Image: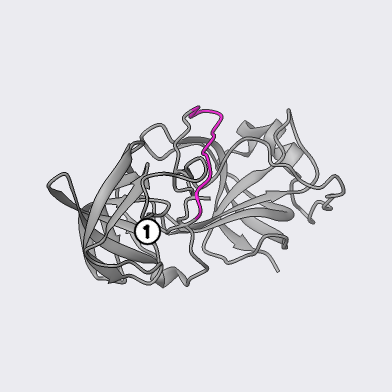
Amino acid sequence: MCAIIVTFTEIKSKKMKNNLKFFTVLFSILLMVGCKDKENYSKINNAATAAKTDIHKIVVKEAVDGGNYTYLNVEENGQNYWMAIANIPVIVGETYYYDGGLVMKDFESKQLNKTFDEIVFVNTIRTSEILAEAPVEAENPHADSPIEVENNVKIEKPKNGTSLAELLSDKKSFSAKSIIVKGKVVKVNNGIMDKNWVHIVDGTQFENNNDLTITTTETVNIGDIVTFKGVVVLDKDFGQGYVYDILLEEAKLVK
């Protein structure tokens, strides 16, 4: 399960073509709760093993405050398992419902000093089986479909840097190389897989692709103009069909 709980929106990836309703992430999966220091993140050892799509009826047997999340031991159809949601009030003994979810194996919570053999991360839980609106579901930390931005976004290319159009139009030549990019933050999902996932645009594009997903331990906000230096990674496979055609990883802010 990917780490944090953030607001998930529908996941769309050019190579995945899977739509998982969820991490209303991530991959916005509720899953994101707020900016935390790196040492407070929980480590994910293995990729997600499954994505749940049905409506689940659960009874909460135990609730543990884990900082970014509330960890719940729940019963469903006679079976007990652990799940993690955004840190919201939950009443032990009450019945709740949720949709979708992302299952992770061998998930380590540093806050609880505990490794879960298996845990389900979900957007949120509710007291009614009926949804007032279409369910918000689990998603991947980023979506590869073009992000709508204001027409006036035009960020000057940084010194010794690369524009997004240059990068996206010639990805292979940048593979495994360290580059500098500058742009406006249009989306942030914090704490997923021990990383913050930042989407930037600079006003340039290639074949209708106009944004870049960056993984970092730095904390930024939507609307910030940022400069990052990181390593270009192509065709990143996190398992279970989560393949990203391009990422800028291990990125650090350039002052």
Res. 74 in view: yes
In x, y percent, where is residue 5? Answer: 43, 58
Residue topped by disc 1:
85
**Chain part drawn in magenta:** 7-17
What is the residue that sits farthest to the left in this orientation?
A: 78
Is label 1 in a helix, a strand or a loop?
A: strand
Is residue 12 inside the magenta stretch? yes
203 lies above or below 82: above
Q: In the image, what residue occupies the spot 35% across and 44% down?
A: 102
Q: State which quarter of the image contains the C terminus.
A: bottom right
**In terms of depth relative to the viewer, which is nearer, 20 or 224?**
20
In x, y percent, where is residue 75? Answer: 18, 52
Is residue 80 inside the magenta stretch? no
Q: In the image, what residue occupies the spot 63% across and 39% down?
A: 174
**Colour scheme employed for the rendering of this structure:** one colour
Magenta portion: prevailing SS class? loop
Label 1 is placed on what type of residue?
Answer: Ile
Q: In the image, what residue occupies the spot 16% across and 44% down?
A: 77
The answer to whether 163 appears left or right of 40 in the picture is: right
Q: In the image, what residue occupies the spot 59% across and 62% down?
A: 252
208 lies above or below 152: above
The answer to whether 112 appears left or right of 21 in the picture is: left
Res. 105 in view: no
In x, y percent, where is residue 177? Answer: 59, 45
The answer to whether 138 appears left or right of 12 in the picture is: left
The residue carrying pointer 1 sits among few (fewer than 14), some (14 to 19) or many (20 or more) residues within 10 Å by Cα, namely: many
Q: How many marks?
A: 1
In x, y percent, where is residue 170? Answer: 69, 32
